[in-house]
Image: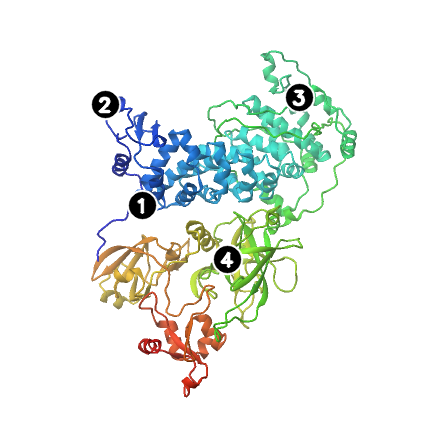
Amino acid sequence: MMNSANPYNPCFDLTIFSKILSRFFPFSLLHSNESASSEPPSDDGDLPAEFSCESAWSPSGRCSDTTTNSEEDLLDKLEGRVIIEIEEAALCLQKITESREDARDFMCHDRLLSAVRPLIISAYSSIQASSLAVLVNLSTENANRVKMVQSGIIPNLTFLLETRSLDVQELAARALLNLSMHDGNKLMIGLLGTLPRLVETLHSKSEKAARDSAMALYHLSLLESNCTKLIQADSVYVIMDLLRSSRHLVETLLLVVCNLGSCPEGQTALLDSGAVRHLLGLLDGGDLKSEWEWFNCLNALLALSKEGDRFRLLAKAYKADKILSKVKMEDSGTFHPKTLQENPPPFSRHFDRWNLIRRRPSAMVDKKRRRGRKNIKSASDETPEILDHQHPVTSPASASSTGFAVPAATAAAAAEPTMNPRAASSRRTRKKPRGSSPERRSSRLSELNGDCSAPLMVEDDERVEPPPPPMPSWETVARVVPAMDAVVKVFCVHTEPNFSLPWQRKRQYSSSSSGFIIGGKRLLTNAHSVEHHTQVKVKKRGSDTKYLATVLAIGTECDIAMLTVSDDEFWEGVSPLEFGELPALQDAVTVVGYPIGGDTISVTSGVVSRMEILSYAHGSTELLGVQIDAAINSGNSGGPAFNDKGKCVGIAFQSLKHEDVENIGYIIPTPVIMHFIHDYEKNGAYTGFPILGVEWQKMENPDLRRSVGMAPDQKGVRIRRIEPTAPESHILKPSDVILSFDGVDIANDGTVSFRHGERIGFSYLVSQKYTGDKALVKVLRNSEILEFNIKLATHKRLIPAHIKGKPPSYYIIAGFVFAAVSVPYLRSEYGKDYEFDAPVKLLDKLLHAMAESVDEQLVVVSQVLVADVNIGYEDIVNTQVLPYLLIECLC
């Protein structure tokens, strides 16, 4: 069968767009210039008033349109499965929410948000863009913002910050900015792991996305707990590098620095990242163009001065007294460089505040602060709080070449903070990020602490004893330590089914494993850790309290389970882990968990030694896996594996136990983890990994390739059998040669190009799809190349690998116990070595048989309960029942 109908093209099409508008609007937006200049009729007829909209969005710049569908119809189409109808409804909602303020108020309800949430990660770009625009429009209303965050859209918006589409990235950043402006959302957005993604978006090629992310960071950093998360994620270094390299983000990022400097740990982190040198360099280089930039830069130095001796030593090393002597303060509370003294603004009365403070005894100020006494300040010493000031808009400029004051070598050596040599080296070699321009918008400066003293300077001829070296910081030695607080211990009580007596269960038993916290108040662990669970509890690191957990989803194929905890106390003071990219060979990994041999957290290190399609022991499936040489013991299951940047790159789940090998462990990589998470978020439940339901053979033999009509430059694999229950059974045929899958060529050995110098089985491409997705398969049939769009589905096995938490299926009649055969049943009857001890006929069915229909089962008489009616049949055990015999028994 040839492919007679092309798949729907998600790219924007002018013809499709005109059809959409003609269906929803009586006046087409795609008209000639003459019609565009004319005024459209103002009569709305009998249309509902709430959907009568005026829009300025058209090629000509002005039009007035009216929809003919009710809100109920639009929602029905959004929740439907017809792509064109979903696109029409999303576009109509975009127009309505864009033009009508009252519509934004009454349309922001749970049903609409639930319908739009999965659409913003749609594979169709037009649907995705329109749905994002709807969320941006709704988020402009302050009354909608808390409801939108509670609807669960933050994880999807955070995910979209990493997309390659700049338009999608801009819309996601703008929506997050709007939502972060509400005080009730700041804590939740921080807990859902959005902060690190916003920091990464500062490097975006889109100026709009970068500036909106910077402003969102400013609003979120008004909350101290979010400042702590930024510090733990090493975001301070990125921000300080951007202050030096990006002229466009300076003003907004200075606000973030002021907020970070308002907490003690933020002051320490800023000093560690070279904030004194960077801020003084900005003042000395003359690149601060606005008064607010001068004001915020000096405010940041003011906050850092609370570090006392360490700040004074750094300030002296970088010649702060000479740089600050150029700066004067006015009565208005704003700062100006010395060059502005020639044309001072009205009512200016300059005085050298910095020189006055410089002569105050530092020991006295420190002593007063330790005693908790507030400093007595005059009106001129008050740090002003700016409420909703409007930033002046500046034209875009290139990255500034700021000239930093370079101290003497000895002074710099004495002033640099003591740190681990490895960490110091990594900070010096940090890559220079890309900068972009921020948007100046109304905002609110963080209010500095009232007893914060001004910077304390020392004269050049004063002798200051260097401070004692700080105690070693484990966060510097091992960067994964801050993320360890997100690793939890999982306690589970299991009650397995009794397959010999399927009407009852076995005696319960307990186990412990590991898990970790991700965004959205969720946790991940292994599926086998909570299989047949009766009760699940989790305990945080350093805590003595166990919290009841609820299992949200179990992925048997990928051996991952998702949990949540309803007690809000559990989520206090914890930050979710970030996921990193797929590691490369020889990359360092650190496995963290709670293995046997102790009750506290354990850390083992190793490197990535292999990456290929692995057999998952629990799921009886083959998915992408990573082999490492770090020790993975019982209890490590479900624990994260970190890379050298402290990001999670996998989940420990199994190890190879053999007398000839040691330290061979396996982790579930991030592509499989993210597939599980997105599957749950997209469908509200775990639906599984799809397969291509064919049995194939390699085409490495040249005579075999010639026999099927393959050209010398053609490569692929030959189909031997097709599962009757698979959707492709009606399209593909035995002896077809699969040449490519979704545009990726398949080699004669069944592999595809993976990364530089690596190849992997083409089943990896199939596993990256979701159940119900379509894939383009190119085949060679009778020397003719055909292309088919195939809908992918999960595997239907005659003998299933799992019963997925359901009770065993059985039926009793006349003492005969009929039971459906599954892998757990075989394991229960014949032990762990069932692959050797089970009857050959059952093993042949397990390995080679294919189900003829979706409801077909392999049924056996597991045993006979002795009774008068079944005399002579007492010895029948695990004997297969043919269908017609079973029907006669049941009748």
Q: Quadrant of residue 844?
A: bottom left
In the displayed orientation, state which residue is furthest to the front: 868
Whichever of callouts 4 and 2 sits on the residue coming sooner in the sequence is 2
Q: CA distance from mark 3 to mark 4?
A: 61 Å
Sequence-first disc among 4 and 1: 1
Work out how far the residue at label 4 is from the one at label 2, CA to CA, in angstroms. 61 Å
Mark nearest the camera among 2 and 1 is: 1
Q: Residues within 10 Å of mark 1 (few under 14, many from 20)?
A: some
Q: Which mark lies nearer to you, 3 or 4?
A: 4
Task: Say if 726 sits above or below 857 in the image.
Answer: above
Q: Return the residue at label 3.
A: 325
Say which element carries label 2.
Answer: helix
Q: Nearer the viewer, residue 157 or 814?
A: 814
Residue 561's disc number:
4
Q: Are marks 1 and 3 in contact (CB under 8 Å)?
A: no
Residue 490, compared with residue 839, is above or below; it is above
Q: Which residue is mark 2?
A: 34
From the viewer's side, name the closer residue of 678 and 603: 678
Residue 577 drawn at (x, y percent): 55, 49
Percent coordinates x, y for residue 46 in the rendering:
29, 30
